[in-house]
Image: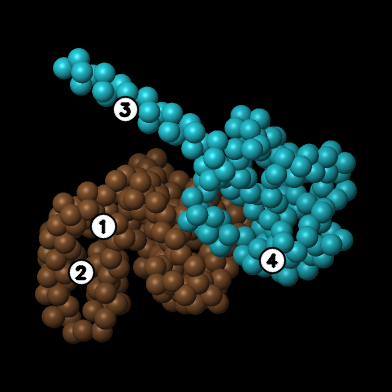
Chain colours: A brown, B cyan
Amino acid sequence: MNNQEQNFSDEFLNAFVDDQLTPEEKAQVYARLSGDETLSRQICELRKTRDLVQLAYKQPPMPARGLATLSAGRKIGLGVAAGLMLLVGGITGWFLHQPSANQVISVAQNGPGDDTPAKVLFHVSDGHTEHLKGVLDDVESLMQYYRRSHQTARVEVITNGEGLGLVLAGISPYAERVRQMQKEYHGLTFVACQNTIDRFQEELGITAKLLPGVVVIDSGVAQIMRRQHQGWAYIQG
Amino acid sequence: MKKLIALSVMALLSLGLGTSAAYADDHAKQKVVYHINSDDEKLLKAALGNIQNHINAVGKDNLDLRVVMHGPGVDLLKLANKNPDFQDKVSNLKRQGVHFNVCNNTLVGRKIDYKNDLYDVSKEDIVPSGVAELAILQSQGFSYVKP
């Protein structure tokens, strides 16, 4: 599918997964993602590896914000170095800690003024316009709550089934609102389920084109389980 | 080998005893939050039924159960203000230790006067943000249930 086009290098994709690309570079990847199944799966795999490595920690490290301001060339090098360090650290940490299941699963305690980001996922599987509006209202009010209480937060809106409609270009009734919220809230990510995308293609003949900035994961349900395992709070939108 | 098996059995037994003893302890209460953001009367009625069944199964003394309402879900307590059946159910649950928490954003946004429009709500029952409360409670070890 992408033979004519230049393939992204592993370093580039790693930097993408670690959220270390410039908006323009990210846009390139997103533009290709919607039409390129192999690329989606490749990124899914990278994400999975990253998540597994982070799981080895009691408290997963956040991607360093400072990296985003460095030049593109150094950034990729640093991304690789950081990836290696993460891996080494993860393995060492694994042997040092031998964390019990309890420690890994326990939800991070956080309150106002705490450095640990609050982590919340919204699960959206209902595609009715009214329902989607309610979800976006809830997400927005949560983001504002964290802003008011000066607390950092990572929030994922995970769409699958009919809920995928929220993030489909040309179909979403709230494309503009999603764009504004992505711009407004740094820690907010909209996520789409690859399984649903495949199903839409097979059953309805719709080739899903995602809104810019939407991240594709292998399976919405698997992602929800991963996140809860990592201590994220779950809210059914 | 026999000795080893006997030892393992003893260890397992004592572990079992330990956990059941801890369960009776106040700190080992089952913690659960019910999320309500729908004004569908059937759903709300079923939710109150779920909660009663939950208490029957676990025992009111072994349970810290919170109901967090926001958006249209606040209608549960509006209904309880007018409908005697709902009112009975809610006050019954309260007598068994269930907390009904209302989202302040919703009260402000929908201009709801909690003293007059809602059934039996006091200041302590109001949380700043219902959605944030769901996240906070989960971070404190509460399980999440959406009826």
Q: Earlier in the sequence, mark 4 or mark 3?
A: 3
For label 4, the crowd category at 10 Å Cα-Cα, with few meaning under 14, some 14 to 19 and many 20 or more, is many
The foreground one among B77 and B41 is B77
Q: Are marks 2 and 3 in contact (CB under 8 Å)?
A: no
How packed mark 3 is, by other alpha carbons closer than 10 Å (few <14, some 14-19, many 20 or more), is few
Q: Secondary structure at mark 1?
A: loop
Q: Amino acid at mark 3?
A: Ala
Chain designation of label 4: B
Q: CA distance from mark 2 to mark 3?
A: 49 Å
The chain letter for the residue carrying disc 2 is: A
Q: Mark 3 belongs to which subunit? A: B
Q: Report the residue marked by disc 4.
A: B104
**Which residue position holds label 1?**
A57
Q: Are marks 1 and 4 in contact (CB under 8 Å)?
A: no
Residue that appears at 41% across and 59% down: A108
User: Is A28 above or below relative to A60?
Assistant: below
The reply to whether discs 1 and 2 touch (Cβ–Cβ < 8 Å) is: no
Quarter containing the C terminus of chain B = top right
